[in-house]
Image: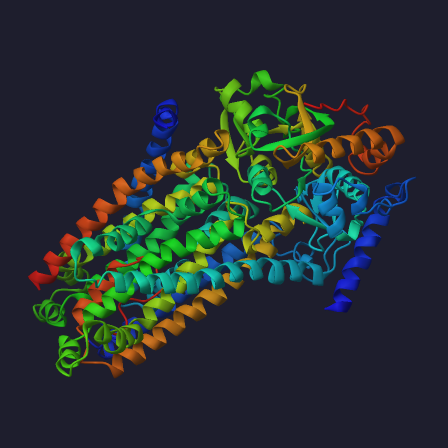
Amino acid sequence: MSSVLYDAPGPVARRREAWGSVVGVLVILVGLFFAVRYAAGRGVFQLDRWDVLWDPPKGQTAADVWRSLLVQGLGATLRAAAIAAPLALGLGLLLALWRRVPNVWLRAPAIGVVEIARGLPVLLVMLFGWLGFNMQPLSAVVFGLTLYNMAIFAEILRAGLAALPRGQAEASLAIGMTRWQTLLSIELPQAVRTMTPSLIAQLVVLLKDSSLGFIIGYVELLRVIQRNTAFFGADYTVALFVVGAGVYLAINISLSRLAIRLQRRGSRRSAGTIDKQKLTVATAMLDPTGGLDKSTGF
Amino acid sequence: MRTRMTRAAALGAVALLALGACASNGGGDGAADVDAGDFPEGSTMARLADAGSIKIGTKFDQPLFGLVGPNGVPEGFDVEIGKLVAGELGIDEGDIEWIETVSSVREDSIANGTVDIIVATYTINDTRKEKVSFAGPYYLAGQSLLTLKTNTDIQGVDDIGGMKICTASGSTPEQNLLENYPDAEVVPFGQYSDCLEPLRNNQVHAISTDNVILAGFAAEHDDLEVRGEQFTEEPYGIGLAKDDTDFRNFINDVLEKIFEDGRWVEAWEATAGTVLPTPEPPTIDRY
Amino acid sequence: MIDVFLDNGPAYLAGFRMTLALTAVAGVASLVFGTILAALRVAPLRPLRVLATGYVELLRNTPLTLVFFGMVLVAPQFGIIPPIGFWTAIICLTLYTSAFVCEALRSGINSVGVGQAEAARAIGLTFGQSLALVIFPQAVRTVIPPLINVIIALAKNTSVAAGFAVVELVATGRRLGQAIPGEAVTILGGIAILYLLFTIPAGLFATRIEQKVAFAR
């Protein structure tokens, strides 16, 4: 780890840093030790509070528990995301292209839609679908996820288009392609490729937001955990929560890592052709809750 | 997959047996011997009987009334009532699709066709009648309070001023508290079972909803008890599509039939009756 | 149609006030906590960096709903029992948002030219001094637009508290929407406008500053 903030350490500093690290690690370990001991004192680690995962009480089998968590719960979470993601991507693409229409007045509705969809809480949009338009919970969740992420996808693609060097469009127009041909076959493919990491990072947000379904009665992973704790009793809350949180983290961190890897690779390959300043600025402005590490790459 | 399903079914059967042999009844425990032709053409009954399946909404986290474990087999009084209605349509228990309907989604679940009927501690009231129709009532409950046994401050509903009272958002108890007990601080969660841990951790002072729901929680948790007299009357009805009068009359007939032939009492004693006294069947309200 | 708003004016107002309070309190707390995290993340001591990085990585990949769920239903198992409702929401929103504040600040710090830090060190400033006197003042300018966006996201995220015993705007909308069937679209439309009144201007403001900073470079 090199930083602009301090020199590559010399021998003295390195020794000091080594000691500091040792002390730091010790402090953290001691803190962790006491936390674990405290939790153990409250019986959190007792085996009979975890056996719900392999030998559950109340006449249920471990297979039942895991099926409810992974097939029913995680399945529903992924289903909502899997329906919403392509919809949002398609509509986002449409909006991004719409915003390239030369006439300001024709363009305005696209801008309006994006601004409104970005400005509303996803949960509120889900409520609109559910209470306002009498949708079933799954449709309402998909509705909310689609509307919001379509706006973000549109903005990501727009940023990608804006960051392309002008020479690309100029060259294409010079060889006689029309504006739309230029957009669709020259600019867009490049924009999509540069923005793939951001698009994937936004998928993490989409997946995370699917958990809002919990609040409007969509039976997804969180709801199944809640239901299981209601059924088996609060003693099992920790065990079931650890499984649920673990599943979310495993999926989201893998997606985030993928995005960062793609971004690093992309930035190496396209170095010099993209207006980096513009692109960094544009992506940072989008969804700040995105999983993409904005300071790497570029 | 196949073996897994068989095993789940077997387990379900075992669970039901364990629940008490009383679940089986005089009329045979399967479906009545009817088919679509027995019902007026184009009626909901004919459609359901023809399909041979029905989607019933119930609570999944309500001890005594509708409780579902991870194996997906629901149990409780509401569940038994649902089975009896389905049986009269010639639909087997196994062909019932149980769908969780938490308090806040019930009207909409009917309106948008997620479920055919709802048996889910569902109070009949005028606001709801604007969106759904009700058969029944099949039980008369009343709103009450659940506190820690150690709580001495709350003896009844008159003591809840300034107290944090937990309930489900979008429920009748919530509306009632907001309108008639403005001094109480309402703490709304998605479902009643979310209120249990906050109550046991002293984060709220009481849970308020129907006495029977509370009795179910009290039966599962030794440290909790129901406090005071019930302060409302909550007739539980079976929700169905608005203005489907034929279907409503049919369900009302079914209810009257099971009130009389003892199947209603059997269903009660096998479920909620394990904790609560057996009441007289209510009078059907054919509004 | 207007009647719906007039009749429920107090409810709307109470909900709006709650959303504002959540945003303001959690916003300030997140800025403070997020700044501490950012300082840890660029600190010269590896364990501190690892700790802060781990925290940010963990929270950024966790749904906010899960954070709430953990605080309301799981934390009490460990004997951590915050007052339910408002303060639980503040804790959860702060834990979550500070991770994003940290990221915004860190990318701001990294955006300051290398020469600036080198020059600061060359004239003998310590790590703390160069961070406080040279890097931070410059980073703040680039950092403000993303920070505004983090606060916008926070304002929208306060809606998650609706599922956990806080009656803010969205919970008000749900309560009214269920109490007055048939008017749900109107009622929720009113709620939406209240959000947009904050989020759209704030977003445009952020973009304006963004452009200014970009030109100043």
Residue at x-position 35% and y-position 73% = A260
Left or right side of B26 for C181: left
Which of B23 and B49 lies nearest the eye of the viewer?
B49
Which of C144 and A44 lies nearest the eye of the viewer?
C144
Instruction: Pinpoint residue C99: horizontal percent, then vertical percent.
Output: 34, 56
Residue C28 sits above or below residue B176 on the image: below
> In the rendered picture of this protein, how many numbered marks are placed on residues?
0
Residue at x-position 48% and y-position 59% = A32
Left or right side of B28 for C7: left
Q: Quadrant of the N terminus of chain A?
A: bottom left
- State whether residue B217 appears in this view: yes
Instruction: Pinpoint residue A272: horizontal percent, then vertical percent.
Output: 17, 80
Residue at x-position 28% and y-position 48% = C151
- State whether residue B224 appears in this view: no
Spot the residue most to the right: B26
Residue C161 sits above or below residue B170 on the image: below
- Identify the coloring: rainbow
